[in-house]
Amino acid sequence: MSLTQLNSSCYDTINSEVNAFFTSGNYSGVNISIFTDAEGTTFLTDSIGNIDARRIASINHVASYEDKETGLTTNPTITITFLDESSVTAVDTVHTYYYSLTGVPYVPRTFGTGTL
């Protein structure tokens, strides 16, 4: 399994990867697994459990900025929100996470095959 580090600099990459799944026409969604190690042996967990093959709803990025009131610089972040409405935020220089993506195969459905 090939893993990519999850941080704000990979925002364009992860978006391109997700778009590639959709534009292939073979997938109806994209799942992400997030790990705390580069070997992919330990899943990141949240209040729901392991982040293992969770369906992505959205991906957002916030660039580094200086807070006008405090003068402190805020690290850039990338946030993955899942269909179950949970989310995970990776803060650059604070969190070290790795991810892999898998497509959710499109399953054609037929309707009206019964007889009246």
Image (cartoon, rainbow, N blue to C red):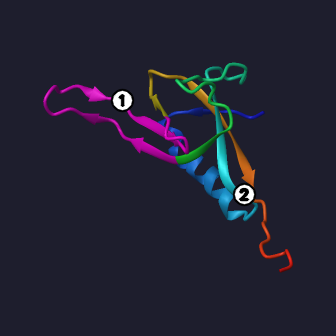
Residue in the image at 73% along x and 63% along y: 24
- Rendered image quadrant of residue 77: top left
The spot of residue 12 in percent (x, y) is 53, 49
Rounded to the nearest whole Å, what is the CA distance between mark 2 and mark 1?
34 Å
Residue in the image at 56% along x and 51% along y: 15
Residue in the image at 36% along x and 40% along y: 63
Q: Amino acid at mark 2?
A: Tyr
Left or right, 31 with respect to 87, comes to right
Q: Quadrant of the C terminus?
A: bottom right
Judge whether residue 77 is colored magenta.
yes
Instruction: Give the magenta part as a residue range.
Output: 58-86
Q: Amino acid at mark 1?
A: Asn
In this rendering, the answer to whether 10 lies above or below 36 is: below
Q: Residues within 10 Å of mark 2 (few under 14, many from 20)?
A: some
The spot of residue 73 in percent (x, y) is 27, 28
Q: Residues within 10 Å of mark 1 (few under 14, many from 20)?
A: some
Which residue was labeled with disc 1? 75
Judge whether residue 71 is colored magenta.
yes
- Rendered image quadrant of residue 72: top left
Q: Nearer the viewer, mark 2 or mark 1?
A: 2
| Numbered circle sitting on residue 27 | 2
- Rendered image quadrant of residue 1: top right
Left or right, 113 with respect to 56, comes to right
Q: Secondary structure at mark 2?
A: strand
107 or 73: which is nearer to us? 107
The spot of residue 103 in percent (x, y) is 72, 49
Q: Residue furthest bottom?
A: 116
Q: Secondary structure at mark 1?
A: loop
